Image (cartoon, rainbow, N blue to C red):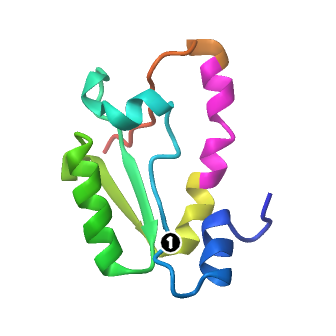
């Protein structure tokens, strides 16, 4: 929808004083609030420009049950481009898996 950009970048551009952050958009919504219900630890991708916002978001993720080790900081808000593109893949997974909690995981 935003060639060469992302919604996160566009929001940061028009709201320069706002601490825009992108995370939890690469999974079925139920996994966002109960990541430990999944068999395989999921990955929460993190994108944002403001270091203090990253600390705040990590604290919120911790409250939702996301261990810090399950987060992967991709860098500044421009990295939201990748996560937003992955979101386009999720409806296909939902069609095959059904309306069950699922998320992507980076194995290394």
Residue 39: x, y in percent? 29, 20
> In percent of the image, x 19 and y 46: which residue is there?
67
> In percent of the image, x 66 and y 36: which residue is there?
89
Q: In front here: 75 or 54?
A: 54
Please state, as top left, top right, bottom left or bottom right, where the C terminus lies in the image.
top left
Residue 56: x, y in percent? 28, 67
Q: Does the magenta run of residues contain 12?
A: no
Q: In front here: 15 or 85?
A: 15
Q: Is residue 84 left or right of residue 57?
A: right
Looking at the image, residue 79 lies above or below residue 65:
below
Q: Is residue 2 left or right of residue 13?
A: right
Q: Quadrant of residue 103?
A: top left
Looking at the image, residue 94 lies above or below residue 44:
above
> In percent of the image, x 61 and y 45: which residue is there?
86
Looking at the image, residue 31 lies above or below residue 97:
below
Q: Does the magenta run of residues contain 89?
A: yes
> In percent of the image, x 36 and y 44: which residue is there?
43
Please state, as top left, top right, bottom left or bottom right, where the N terminus lies in the image.
bottom right
Residue 19: x, y in percent? 46, 77
**How many labels sit on residues?**
1
Span of residues in magenta: 84-94
Q: Is residue 9 left or right of residue 25?
A: right
Number of other residues with Cα within 10 Å of mark 1, as a class: few under 14, some 14 to 19, many 20 or more: many
Tell me the element at label 1. loop
Secondary structure of the magenta portion, mostly? helix
Mark 1 lies on residue: 20
Q: Quadrant of residue 48?
A: bottom left
């Amino acid at each position: 929808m935003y060639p060469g950009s992302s919604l996160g970048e566009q929001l940061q551009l028009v709201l320069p004083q706002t601490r825009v952050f992108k995370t939890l958009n690469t999974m079925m919504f139920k996994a966002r609030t109960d990541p430990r219900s999944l068999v395989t630890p999921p990955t929460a991708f993190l994108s944002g420009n403001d270091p203090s916002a990253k600390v705040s978001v990590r604290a919120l993720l911790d409250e939702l049950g996301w261990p810090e080790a399950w987060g992967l900081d991709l860098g500044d808000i421009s990295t939201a481009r990748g996560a937003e593109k992955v979101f386009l893949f999720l409806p296909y997974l939902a069609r095959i898996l059904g309306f069950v909690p699922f998320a992507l995981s980076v194995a290394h």
